[in-house]
Image (tube, coloured by chain):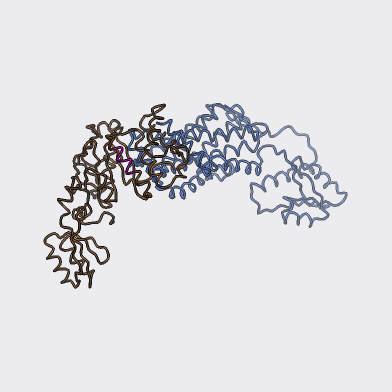
Chain colours: A blue, B brown
């Protein structure tokens, strides 16, 4: 019976362009767009031009321009006002005005987001200090190292290492809406009634409706990660088994959430209007659209109330940190299984067969 | 074939079905009639194991549905009122799924599907998506999905709703052929003439109770003998209200079909006293509809 249910639901899915689009095409579009928008790790793009004015022949100006570092390049301007104008109009991210005497003026929009402004302001301040301070031979004072227990990241982190799992989790959980819609649709059409009239145990009727979506969810994640690896150069830095088990836990959790939606959701229209909002908020809190590491502390902690954050933490480890083992991602897998059990219990408690 | 014993269902304080006793004889077509909300669908749902009864028992072919649900359900085929099929799939894909629910597989399933398609007259459209079918063809597939496992008892809930005359005739002929082949059928319908033409016996349900059970002739003889048609003039509303106090009344414009509870004379006096005039009095030919009206006080298509 379960085999027939899988076949039936796969056949239905293949004829439903809307569902195919939301499960397979939309995540790919999001992966490509977000992957192109953000940079993670070493920025191999062009250095960013910094508007700069210094008095002609000024030694300080020449030293600063030379010492800006690999991330920036000096863009000489004819006057100080021209530098300020370039920053004010957004033509340049920041500028430097080097007078004949006195402090160097760092021109930057102080109202800009700290995530954008902070690194630029810090890097330019350091570059100016390095260029103007007298060279003093000093021993190495600061060296960045990951603490014990945290594996070293890949040397070259592609943006797709982050956007593929982010969107796979976001859209993977959209499977729960499809599951709930299926229950609602079968109730409306009367096929659920027919199923209950058949010599099939009720638990089997329920499992027979859920299992096809577990299979579809696995195919969806395999497709997205496969495309990420083959099409976008995504690498797996840690255990492949860890990645597989984590993905199975994500799909299980999404299917159980679907059962919960089905048990409280009502009609297809009600599910269609509420589930996407709930799923988007969960995705947002979980860091699917914006990295949790850049969120305020409270929001970062709040993220742990949704399974998405656990899934993404696990994916980040296994995709980015070298040598990540199955044991390293076990807490994420455990948390996802815990969420799945909670959703399933609540769903079963509320579910009405008749 | 099907025995309902003290069967009832409560929804909160309301008893949708009170305590229904009914025996469906093997090989017969039993018509189930009742106004909307009478409890027909709830009764059928309990009989098929879709809804758990609040009280009473169901036995299919002598097998207790509560004790051996799978063995009992295997003998029964349900054709719900709604089009309980997957419109995106083809007829054959639908039947493959519904057949598998009854444990059919392989060549046996293929043979059953071929038979069900033949019965439904859909063999030549078997691989087409159902969404391209006409309303009548969908209805026929709905029946085929309930038949695919060749049940001993087929329950048809309003099988001809919204179908064209051609498909309706096909469904009629199908039911007759299945009956001739020995299948037991329970048939609910809003169309009195269908039940009258098809069914060996008719059960009339109202307010969750079995009001009458018998052959069409028995029901007409026992309950429809006093039907009279009156044509009113003057204050028709007041006249109709006065008539209702003296029997069951079905109104259609200025015509009343009445079954007086006492004598017709008392009813006519009351109508005229209310300000209406009786322009015509005609004894109505007794049929199942007048019997139904007498038993339920409502026309079958009334809400």
Answer above or below: position of B283 versus A305.
Answer: below
Foreground: B222 or B7?
Answer: B222
Q: Is residue B177 magenta?
A: yes
* Residue numbers of the magenta segment: B171-178
Quadrant in which the C terminus of chain B appears? bottom left
Does residue A88 appear left or right of residue A197 in this picture?
Answer: right
| Quarter holding residue B58 | top left
Q: Position of residue A204 (x, y in %)?
A: 37, 33
Residue nearest the viewer, comparing B287 with A79 = B287
Residue at position x 37%, y 49% in the image: B163
Residue A181 horizontal side relative to residue B289, left or right? right
**Above or below A271: residue A248:** above
Residue B114 shown in magenta: no
Q: Left of A302 or right of it: where is B218?
A: left
Rendered location of residue A126, percent (x, y): 73, 43
Residue A241 relative to residue B123: left or right? right
Residue nearest the observer in this picture, B33 or A317: B33
Determine which quarter of the picture holds residue B68: top left
Q: Magenta stretch: dominant SS?
A: helix
Closer to the camera, A211 or A287? A211
């Amino acid at each position: 019976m379960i085999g027939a249910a899988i076949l039936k639901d796969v056949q239905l899915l293949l004829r439903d362009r809307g569902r195919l689009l939301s499960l397979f095409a939309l995540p790919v579009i999001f992966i490509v767009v977000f992957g192109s928008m953000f940079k993670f790790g070493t920025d191999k793009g062009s250095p960013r031009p910094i508007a700069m004015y210094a008095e002609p022949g000024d030694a300080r100006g020449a030293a600063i321009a030379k010492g800006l570092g690999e991330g920036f390049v000096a863009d000489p301007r004819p006057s100080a006002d021209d530098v300020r104008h370039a920053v004010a109009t957004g033509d340049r991210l920041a500028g430097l005005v080097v007078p004949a005497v006195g402090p160097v003026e760092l021109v930057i929009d102080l109202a800009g987001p700290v995530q954008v402004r902070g690194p630029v302001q810090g890097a330019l301040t350091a570059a100016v200090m390095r260029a103007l301070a007298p060279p003093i031979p000093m021993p190495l004072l600061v060296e960045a190292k990951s603490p014990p227990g945290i594996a070293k990241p890949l040397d070259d982190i592609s943006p797709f290492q982050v956007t593929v799992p982010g969107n796979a989790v976001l859209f993977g959980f959209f499977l729960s809406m499809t599951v709930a819609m299926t229950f609602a649709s079968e109730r409306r059409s009367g096929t659920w009634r027919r199923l209950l009239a058949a010599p099939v145990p009720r638990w089997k009727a329920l499992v027979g409706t859920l299992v096809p979506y577990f299979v579809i969810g696995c195919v969806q994640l395999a497709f997205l990660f496969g495309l990420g690896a083959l099409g976008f150069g995504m690498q797996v830095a840690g255990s492949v088994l860890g990645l597989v088990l984590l993905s199975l836990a994500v799909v299980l959790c999404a299917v159980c959430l679907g059962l919960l939606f089905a048990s409280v959701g009502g009609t297809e229209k009600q599910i269609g209007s509420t589930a996407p909002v709930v799923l988007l908020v969960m995705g947002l809190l979980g860091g699917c659209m914006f990295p949790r590491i850049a969120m305020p502390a409270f929001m970062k902690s709040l993220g742990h109330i949704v399974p998405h954050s656990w899934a993404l933490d696990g994916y980040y480890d296994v995709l980015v940190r070298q040598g990540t083992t199955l044991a390293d991602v076990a807490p994420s897998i455990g948390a996802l299984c815990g969420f799945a059990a909670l959703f399933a219990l609540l769903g079963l408690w509320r579910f009405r067969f008749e | 074939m099907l025995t309902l014993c003290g069967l009832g269902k409560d929804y909160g304080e309301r008893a949708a079905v009170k305590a229904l006793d009914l025996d469906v004889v093997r090989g017969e077509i039993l018509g189930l009639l009742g106004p909307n909300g009478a409890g027909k669908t709830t009764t059928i749902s309990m009989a098929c194991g879709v809804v758990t009864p609040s009280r009473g028992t169901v036995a299919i072919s002598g097998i207790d549905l509560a004790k051996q649900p799978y063995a009992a359900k295997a003998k029964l085929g349900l054709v719900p009122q709604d089009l309980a099929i997957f419109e995106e799939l083809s007829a054959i894909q639908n039947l493959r799924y519904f057949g598998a629910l009854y444990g059919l597989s392989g060549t046996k399933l293929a043979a059953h599907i071929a038979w069900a398609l033949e019965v439904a007259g859909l063999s030549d459209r078997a691989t087409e998506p159902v969404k391209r079918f006409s309303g009548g063809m969908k209805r026929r597939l709905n029946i085929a999905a309930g038949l695919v496992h060749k049940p001993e008892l087929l329950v048809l809930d309003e099988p001809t709703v919204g179908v064209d005359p051609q498909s309706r005739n096909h469904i009629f002929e199908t039911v007759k052929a299945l009956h001739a082949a020995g299948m037991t059928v329970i048939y609910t319908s809003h169309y009195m003439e269908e039940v009258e033409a098809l069914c060996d016996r008719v059960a009339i349900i109202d307010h969750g109770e079995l009001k009458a059970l018998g052959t069409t002739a028995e029901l007409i003889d026992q309950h429809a003998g006093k039907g009279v048609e009156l044509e009113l003039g003057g204050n028709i509303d007041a006249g109709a209200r006065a008539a209702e106090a003296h029997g069951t009344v079905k109104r259609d414009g200025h015509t009343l079909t009445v079954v007086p509870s006492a004598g017709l004379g008392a009813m006519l006096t009351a109508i005229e006293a209310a300000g209406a005039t009786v322009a015509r009095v005609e004894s109505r030919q007794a049929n199942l509809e007048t019997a139904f009206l007498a038993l339920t006080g409502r026309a079958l298509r009334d809400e």
